Amino acid sequence: MIDKWIFNEVVPPEMANQPLRFLLHQYWLIPKHLIFSLRHNQRVLVNGQYLPVNFPVHTGDRIQMTFLPQDFGQPYPEVLVDSAATIEVLYEDRNLIVINKRRGDKTHANQPGEVGATMNHLAAYLQAEDISPYMIHRLDQETSGAIVFAKNPAVVPILVANIAKKVIQRTYLAWVSGTNLESIGKINLPIGLDPDDKRKRKVSGPHAVNAVTHYQVIREEKGFSLLSIQLETGRTHQIRVHMAAINHPIVGDPLYNPNDQYEYLLLHSWKLGLVMPFTNQRKTVIAPIPPYFLRFEQSLSKK
């Protein structure tokens, strides 16, 4: 079991002459409580020496940070290993991994002792490195595509913050019923609980919160539209609820389009625009279009 996480990073030109605290918190998005631990125990070094966090740093300075298990509330996630399925890795480095989630798999197990979820399969893949995956965001069980997990606890708050601030951009593909949508649209409808079905969410339902979805029409064919969709907020079932609310439900959605006969939900996490922890370099990861999307498109062309 890993007993510490050491990071060696370099101060970029844009942080020249900024206080070390500003570099850690504002630029690298390290939470204040972790900065306190690093400072209190002198586990943040500048060019090999301890430097108070109010002192300025300079371009090219070497910053070493050492995190210990006690710095985190849950340093070692309890994820059962399940090697029954092989994951498809889209991108991986020492801090994070992006995989192509299979349609039909839960993101994580819901009950003690449960396996078969994406995280269980990923835990099997990472077992050789003595690493457990750390969850950053979720995809619905019937949604396929790109999903990112952390490989150490130090980058979890950084990735979560980048998703919350929309620095990490998630783009989905969806086939929806109907045509004649605006070529570029915005759906701004609050989403709450559905008092009639605890599995579902409902526009303006109880405890509704703000929800905003942006979409762009890629093409229309035989009474259906292919959309590129981005979320401004991240509510449960947000895309599915919003598209149904404007009378363009997603094809194959068993909850919000129950009269549709297509066997699979045609919602796919297509692109992840990542910002890498510490380096802040940008990278776009694309999940291949799943076969059942292509079969649906082929069925339309035959009509």
Image: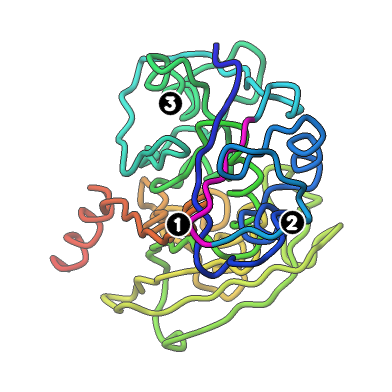
Tell me what residue is drawn at x 33 percent, y 30 percent: 87
Of 15 and 265, the residue lying toward us: 15
The image shows residue 59, relative to residue 224, as above or below, that is above
Q: Secondary structure at mark 1?
A: strand
The x and y percentages for residue 176 are 42, 67
Q: CA distance from mark 1 to mark 2?
A: 30 Å
Q: Earlier in the sequence, mark 3 or mark 1?
A: 3
Q: Which mark is residue 50?
A: none
Name the amino acid type tagged 3.
Answer: Leu
Q: Earlier in the sequence, mark 1 or mark 2?
A: 2
Q: CA distance from mark 3 to mark 2?
A: 41 Å
Specify the color scheme.
rainbow
Q: Give the magenta part as a residue range.
A: 59-66
Q: Which image quadrant is residue 58 in?
A: bottom right
Of 181 and 69, the residue lying toward us: 69
Q: Earlier in the sequence, mark 3 or mark 2?
A: 2
Which of the two discs, 1 and 2, sits closer to the camera? 2
The x and y percentages for residue 201 are 70, 54
The image shows residue 125, relative to residue 9, as above or below, that is above
Question: What residue sits right under mark 3 in the picture?
Answer: 122
Q: Which mark is residue 274?
A: 1
The image shows residue 44, relative to residue 216, as above or below, that is above
Name the amino acid type tagged 1.
Answer: Leu
Tell me what residue is drawn at x 64 percent, y 25 percent: 110
The x and y percentages for residue 174 are 40, 63
Tell me what residue is drawn at x 60 percent, y 22 percent: 4
Question: What residue sits right under mark 2 in the picture?
Answer: 55
Q: Which image quadrant is residue 125 in?
A: top left
Let me know if residue 273 is in the magenta part: no
| Mark 1 surroundings within 10 Å by alpha-carbon count, few (fewer than 14), some (14 through 19), many (20 or more) | many
Q: Main secondary structure of the magenta part?
A: strand
Q: Quadrant of the N terminus?
A: top right
